[in-house]
Amino acid sequence: KILHFLQQHFPDSEDATPAISQLTSFEVNSGPELAAFINTLFDMALFDAERCESYVDMACTLRSRYPEFPPKTEGGKPQTFTRFLLGRGQDLFENLPCTLAATGQIEGTLDHDELQTVLELRKHK
């Protein structure tokens, strides 16, 4: 639902305020729903890098809008917008390849054009 909204309503202009205001009306009723919502926002920000600053503004505004959910386990930390957002960024960072160069395994299975495409995608992550 959030992905469809962003694809249809996120502005081409610099002012994302109306879209952000509409996003505050989306109901999130559990930690997993909040995580899915944040993952979608994060993915869109990576996909649509030209509007990265607008996604940052969106995250800053929405951060205080959504509730805190109980921890998954007793004694754990609460499930919050900020915690999910930081966790997603950390996961992506920790899973970045150590090098942008092609490995022997990839080189052996792709033709030259496919290999170039894979290397370009790695550079833009």
Image: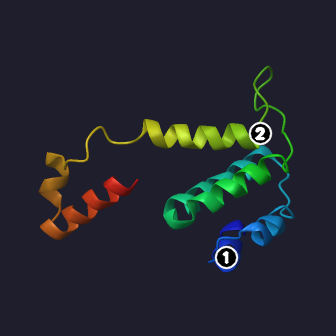
Q: Quadrant of the N terminus?
A: bottom right
Secondary structure at numbered mark 1: loop
103 versus 2 height, above or below = above
Question: Which residue is farthest top?
Answer: 75
* Residue 120 or residue 78, whichever sits in front: 120
Residue at the spot of label 2: 80
Question: Which residue is farthest front?
Answer: 14
Q: Label 2 is placed on what type of residue?
A: Thr
Q: State the residue at coordinates (16%, 59%).
A: 109
Q: State the residue at coordinates (37%, 57%).
A: 124
In the rendering, at what x and y percent does residue 24 appear?
84, 61
* Residue 50 or residue 124, whichever sits in front: 50
61 versus 76 height, above or below = below
Q: Label 1 is placed on what type of residue?
A: Pro
Residue at the spot of label 1: 11
In the rendering, at what x and y percent does residue 16 appear?
71, 68
